[in-house]
Image (cartoon, grey):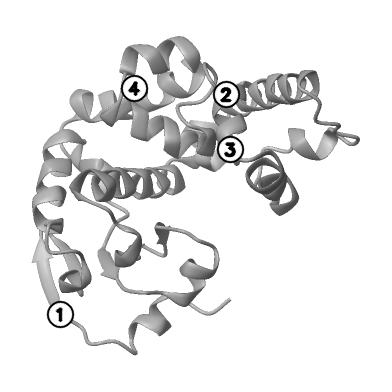
């Protein structure tokens, strides 16, 4: 697949820098959204080392993202944002925290997933979801593919096209911070990271203790060893 940035090169480029991160085409965002203000807020919330993998932010109507109906994505050191999908400041804040989580995950994958605790927790929750769906009439013949922690398009399509978001919100209640967290192991981590910083840490610790402990440990490492 071609790099997302290639489509960005076809639009005019307005460049600025905030907190050491290059921002391109921020003027394409809604007038009510101030990305520099949001970035400064995130810097006040997260440990500095969590920004090590983020070099730049690109704003644009990227075809590859719009075809997948994706608001934002992290890839190769950059966060890509589709401005027409951004509603307001809070919406962009959540998107950016979520994508920073994917950067943190890439840099700390062994520490997060090495012992298998987070994966086991995720699969257990997927299994509960399958039981809940079965109890309300959804016939799942081959459950093995639904217990795969990595992203599987067949599973994603089933959850969000066949079952639908309203039902997924019900069956994931008490298990995931939002239905999107059950999409894959990576999204489980990023969704939990988002909840850790923008939601209820107590709630996350209760419902998802393994992933909570990973995020807590990563954050506390900076307190122990100083700024990176």
Q: Is residue 188 visible?
A: yes
Return the disc, 3 or 2, that comes first in the chain's sequence: 2
Q: Nearer the viewer, residue 27 or 42?
A: 27
Q: Residue at x 76, y 36 (%)?
A: 146
Residue 76 point in image, percent of width and height: 41, 65
Left-right relation of 109 to 11? right
- Which type of secondary structure does the marked residue at label 3 adopt? helix
Observer-side mark, 4 or 1, equals: 1
| Figure quadrant of residue 77 | bottom left
Q: Which mark is residue 132?
A: none
Check the image and report above or below for 184 versus 92. above
Left-right relation of 26 to 212? left
Observer-side mark, 3 or 2, equals: 2
- The residues tagged by marks 1 and 3 sit, at their Cα atoms, a distance apart of 35 Å
Return the disc, 3 or 4, that comes first in the chain's sequence: 3
- Which type of secondary structure does the marked residue at label 1 adopt? loop
Q: Which mark is residue 170?
A: 2
Evaluate if marks 1 and 3 touch, with contact meaning CB atoms under 8 Å apart: no
Return the disc, 2 or 4, that comes first in the chain's sequence: 2
Q: Which mark is residue 216?
A: 4
Observer-side mark, 3 or 4, equals: 3
Q: Which mark is residue 14?
A: 1
Q: Nearer the viewer, residue 134 or 228?
A: 134
Q: Quadrant of the C terminus?
A: top left
- Which type of secondary structure does the marked residue at label 4 adopt? helix
Check the image and report above or below for 101 versus 118. below
Return the disc, 4 or 1, that comes first in the chain's sequence: 1
Evaluate if marks 2 and 1 touch, with contact meaning CB atoms under 8 Å apart: no
């Amino acid at each position: 697949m071609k790099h997302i940035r290639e489509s960005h090169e076809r639009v005019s480029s307005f460049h600025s820098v905030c907190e050491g991160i290059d921002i391109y085409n921020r003027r394409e965002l809604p007038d009510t959204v101030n990305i520099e203000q949001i970035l400064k807020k995130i810097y006040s919330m997260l440990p500095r080392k969590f920004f090590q993998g983020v070099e730049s932010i690109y704003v644009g109507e990227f075809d590859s993202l719009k075809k997948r109906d994706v608001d934002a994505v992290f890839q190769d050191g950059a966060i890509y944002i589709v401005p027409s999908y951004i509603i307001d400041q809070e919406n962009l804040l959540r998107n950016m925290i979520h994508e920073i989580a994917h950067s943190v995950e890439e840099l700390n994958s062994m520490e997060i997933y090495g012992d298998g605790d987070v994966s086991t927790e995720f699969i257990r929750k997927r299994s509960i979801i399958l039981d809940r769906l079965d109890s309300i009439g959804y016939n799942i013949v081959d459950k093995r593919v639904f217990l795969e922690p990595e992203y599987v398009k067949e599973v994603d399509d089933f959850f969000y096209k066949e079952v639908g978001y309203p039902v997924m919100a019900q069956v994931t209640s008490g298990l995931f911070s939002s239905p999107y967290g059950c999409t894959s192991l990576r999204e489980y981590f990023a969704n939990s990271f988002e909840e850790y910083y923008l939601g209820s840490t107590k709630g996350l610790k209760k419902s998802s203790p393994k992933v909570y402990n990973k995020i807590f440990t990563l954050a506390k490492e900076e307190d122990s060893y100083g700024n990176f």
